[in-house]
Image: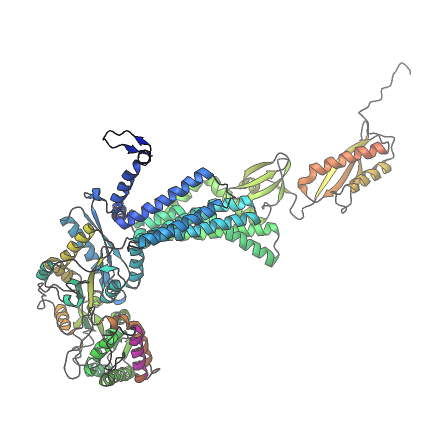
């Protein structure tokens, strides 16, 4: 740690050089002016004004660098800042263009989670490299761990790399999934499986590389693994169980993103299958249910509507008076179902007499729909159409009735 | 008529002056910061020192030099409280680009330790500036080779350490070192495995006996022939051709091998593939570690007429950075004087094997150490590059080595090779810049 403080002290020595201070003062002035403009105008995320403002700032920096260089003073810091600002402005412009063609939320999310932090980290590393050499800084020893020197470079990698591994792996994996889907004709579900597995693989390799980079030797990894096995036995058993369940479910293909399951009596769509839990979307109240992976793994049955195909068979029950001919009623019911555009013609709707009830003859109308999530809406439409059809054909839906026999008459 | 406001000191203050009353203070503060932090006198002086002693064969020796440099830095800091020395090791191949980039930001090092060719490039690029040390400060140190770096009454760089070329061999296989160049070839004919570097400046000592060495060095330093063109005079050309033909013939000997660089030679001697090699003195510590007492060193073989061969010695130089403020510059010069004094030079000679002092007041204990004796003897006839002579041969070593390689493998005739070497020399010197 004292090595790090000594190093920072050395930087301070360079920073208080006159030519460096002058450059820093110019950079600070331009930055503050830009900040003041931003606070006054408060441009929206979709506005091109910040891009124009940054272009003006680049112009000012280039001009300032030229003026500073005139008497032979160093101006590289200003030029470097202008170059970085140029790259940043280009990226910002690209973001604004992408907003027009892609999902805005996705673009902004990737921008804030990946592009911005990555650019800041790379810019910082570039500054340090130009300033004092990255290797020299990375080699600064902090503490000894497992017989290895833990360096500043290792610490920075340990903090930043896992984040960037998780965030940055998203886009290349999506692109690869897209390409494979086009080339190999993968289904959407299989594509998602592939993307997820490839991402886990990427993150896994990254973590191993990181362990090697920070100087974890084989013994250290064995020690950590030993600790983990104890931890698995107690505290993080559930986490590990969920992770393994998630992988298994992916391979098995029963709970993949895009699948529709019957969960707690309601159809729900699988939105994400994460390391620990799956996220399900329930249509009826628009909620997202975060369900631990092992729930599906240990449950006796998982009901899915999308295992082999995406069709669902729906059923509507209705009662008609005893005085109506059942054949006529069944024909009418089937006709009603066929008339609904959202009911599939094949397999054909099927009317059934299911019971002679106390008050009515009970019928069931079974029909097939394309999207399991549409069942409540289509069933409602069919029920309404049955009412109107019965009305038109004077078919009575009887109230509950009971025939009373008076003994006095006998 | 401007609107005047009352002022206690007498002169009324203009409204515009009042409005901007804080500006002069701000500007003064900025100016104070910009001119070098006048109020920071009590802060420690942080001195940036870059070290690029070379790579390849002398890697391990460089490491020992680096360790010693760190030790010297600690000793200097102990004697100079309030001074922090920050050492940075930059590979020689990157030194120019790295320092150029840092200097463009204004954060170039205060002091740079490099070999002669990079030091000259630093001067030419304006990345270093002459020493401000007075003769009264330098004269007592009796620094060798200093005059080769003089410009007017100042020095562009200061010699720091010198690393001579030697012959290193395994005494189990070779009982007595070859005395002359022909003996070397004879030794190879007897079946001893001899290794020579294919790097031009490290091989040039074999040309001494042919009379080709000085003309080639002069040509590569930019000298012109009597007709004003870059190249060699007819007599010198003849000598150079004789040397190239010797190289070609020598390579025919199956046990005389030309390897690409000194590092490969040292490795081959370590593993026993070779019995005798020409080496730089900085390789001794590495070879000693592997060969122990079986390692022997001697001066390089003489010419066939008995004259000492004149090999290139490596010279480490101290250059001063251009971005230092006056205080940093003062401390940098103080540190330079510290590493050049008898104590430090003696320390370096004894503990970083292969490094010879430039301070002539340091006594080299040649009687106690055959290695130091061989180095001292070799130095007496060595060519030590300076900014006037010898740097061209180092700068163009790589491309000329390629030409030599093609020559010894018969792809180019000696005449064609010489033509290409002359062309390289001409290309490196723009018209009108020859001496």
Q: Position of residue B324 (x, y in %)?
A: 23, 53
Height in image: B206 above or below A356?
A: below
Please, which residue is most extreme toward the right here? A410
x and y, in percent, of residue B422 in the image: 29, 79
Quarter occupied by the C terminus of chain B? bottom left
**Whether residue A368 is visible:** yes
In this rendered view, identify the residue nearer to me: B135 or B431.
B431
| Looking at the image, residue A334 lies above or below residue B422 | above
Residue nearest the viewer, comparing B277 with B7:
B7
Quadrant for the N terminus of chain B in the image = top left
Numbered circles on residues, count: 0
Q: Which residues are magenta?
A: B416-435
Q: Is residue B51 magenta?
A: no
Judging depth in this view, the residue of A209 and A165 nearest the camera is A165
Residue situated in front as seen by the camera: A382 or B74 = B74
Name above or below for residue B325 compared with residue B158: above
Which color scheme does this rendered protein use?
rainbow
Residue A166: x, y in percent?
46, 47
Q: Residue at x 85, y 32 (%)?
A: A395
Question: Image quadrant of residue B219?
Answer: bottom left
In screen coordinates, is B96 left or right of A173?
left
Question: Can you give x and y, in whole percent of width and height, for residue A357 in the image?
Answer: 80, 29
Name the residue rendered at 47%, 44% in the picture: A112
Instruction: Locate residue A72: give its quadrant.
Output: bottom left
Q: Main secondary structure of the magenta part?
A: helix
Outermost residue, top side: A408
Q: Would you say residue A222 is visible in this rendering?
A: no
């Amino acid at each position: 740690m004292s090595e790090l403080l000594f190093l920072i002290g050395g930087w301070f020595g360079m920073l208080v050089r006159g030519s460096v201070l002058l450059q820093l003062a110019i950079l600070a002035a331009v930055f503050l002016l830009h900040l003041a403009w931003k606070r006054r105008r408060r441009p929206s995320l979709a506005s091109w004004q910040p891009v124009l403002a940054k272009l003006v700032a680049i112009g000012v920096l280039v001009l300032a660098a030229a003026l500073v260089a005139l008497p032979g003073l160093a101006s590289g810091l200003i030029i470097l800042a202008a170059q970085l600002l140029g790259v940043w402005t280009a990226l910002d412009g690209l973001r604004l263009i992408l907003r027009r063609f892609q999902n805005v939320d996705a673009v902004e999310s990737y921008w804030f989670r990946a592009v911005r932090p990555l650019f800041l980290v790379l810019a910082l590393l570039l500054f340090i490299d130009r300033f004092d050499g990255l290797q020299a800084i990375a080699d600064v020893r902090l503490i000894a761990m497992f017989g290895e020197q833990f360096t500043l470079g290792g610490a920075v990698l340990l903090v930043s790399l896992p984040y960037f591994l998780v965030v940055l792996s998203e886009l290349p994996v999506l692109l690869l999934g897209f390409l494979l889907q086009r080339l190999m004709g993968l289904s959407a579900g299989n594509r998602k499986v592939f993307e997820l597995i490839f991402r886990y693989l990427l993150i896994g390799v990254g973590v191993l590389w990181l362990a090697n980079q920070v100087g974890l030797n084989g013994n250290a990894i064995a020690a950590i693994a030993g600790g983990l096995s104890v931890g698995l036995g107690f505290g993080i058993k559930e986490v590990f169980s969920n992770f393994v369940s998630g992988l298994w479910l992916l391979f098995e293909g029963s709970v993949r993103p895009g699948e529709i399951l019957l969960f707690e009596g309601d159809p729900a769509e699988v939105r994400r299958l994460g390391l620990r839990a799956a996220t399900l979307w329930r249509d009826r109240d628009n909620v997202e249910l975060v369900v631990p992976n092992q729930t599906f793994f240990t449950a006796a049955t998982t009901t899915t509507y999308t295992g082999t195909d995406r069709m669902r068979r729906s059923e509507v029950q209705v009662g008609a008076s005893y005085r109506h001919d059942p054949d006529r009623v069944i024909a009418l019911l089937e006709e009603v179902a066929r008339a609904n555009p959202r009911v599939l013609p094949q397999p054909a709707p099927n009317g059934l007499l299911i019971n002679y009830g106390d008050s009515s003859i009970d019928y069931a109308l079974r029909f097939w729909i394309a999207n399991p999530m549409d069942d409540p809406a289509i069933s409602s439409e069919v029920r309404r159409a049955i009412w109107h059809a019965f009305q038109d054909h004077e078919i009575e839906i009887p109230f509950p009735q009971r025939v009373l026999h008076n003994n006095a008459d006998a | 008529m401007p609107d005047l406001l009352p002022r206690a000191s007498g002169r009324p203050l203009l409204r515009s002056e009042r409005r901007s009353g804080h500006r002069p203070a701000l500007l003064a503060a900025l100016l104070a910061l910009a001119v070098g932090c006048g109020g920071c006198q009590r802060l420690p002086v942080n001195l940036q020192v870059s070290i690029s002693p070379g790579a390849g064969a002398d890697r391990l020796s460089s490491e020992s030099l680096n360790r010693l440099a760190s030790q010297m830095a600690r000793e200097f800091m102990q004697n100079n409280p309030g001074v922090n020395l920050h050492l940075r090791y930059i590979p020689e191949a990157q030194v120019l680009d790295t320092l150029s980039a840092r200097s463009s930001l204004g954060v170039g090092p205060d002091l740079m330790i490099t070999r002669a060719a990079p030091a000259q490039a630093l001067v030419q690029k304006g990345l270093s500036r002459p020493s401000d040390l007075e003769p009264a400060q330098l004269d007592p140190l009796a620094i060798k080779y200093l005059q080769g770096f003089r410009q007017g009454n100042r020095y562009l760089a200061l010699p720091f350490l010198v690393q001579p070329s030697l012959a290193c061999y395994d005494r189990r296989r070779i009982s007595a070192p070859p005395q002359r160049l022909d003996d070397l070839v004879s030794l190879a004919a007897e079946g001893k495995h001899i290794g020579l570097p294919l790097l031009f400046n490290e091989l040039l000592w074999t040309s001494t006996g042919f009379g080709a060495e000085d003309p080639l060095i002069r040509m590569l330093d930019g000298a012109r022939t009597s007709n004003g063109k870059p190249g060699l005079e007819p007599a010198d050309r003849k000598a150079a051709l004789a040397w190239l033909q010797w190289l070609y013939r020598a390579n025919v000997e199956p046990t005389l091998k030309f390897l690409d660089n000194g590092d490969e030679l040292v490795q081959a001697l370590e593993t026993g593939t070779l019995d005798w090699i020409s080496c730089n003195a900085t390789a001794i510590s590495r070879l000693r570690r592997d060969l122990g007492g079986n390692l022997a060193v001697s001066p390089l073989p003489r010419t066939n007429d008995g004259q000492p061969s004149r090999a290139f010695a490596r010279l480490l130089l101290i250059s001063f950075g251009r971005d230092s403020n006056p205080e940093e510059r003062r401390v940098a010069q103080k540190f330079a004087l510290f590493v050049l004094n008898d104590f430090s030079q003696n320390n370096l000679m004894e503990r970083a094997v292969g490094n010879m002092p430039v301070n002539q007041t340091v006594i080299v204990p040649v009687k106690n150490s055959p290695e130091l004796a061989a180095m001292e003897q070799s130095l007496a006839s060595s060519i030590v590059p300076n900014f006037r002579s010898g740097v061209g041969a180092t700068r163009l070593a790589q491309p000329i080595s390629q030409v030599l390689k093609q020559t010894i493998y018969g792809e180019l005739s000696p005449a064609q090779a010489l033509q290409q070497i002359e062309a390289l020399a001409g290309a490196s010197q723009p018209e009108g810049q020859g001496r």
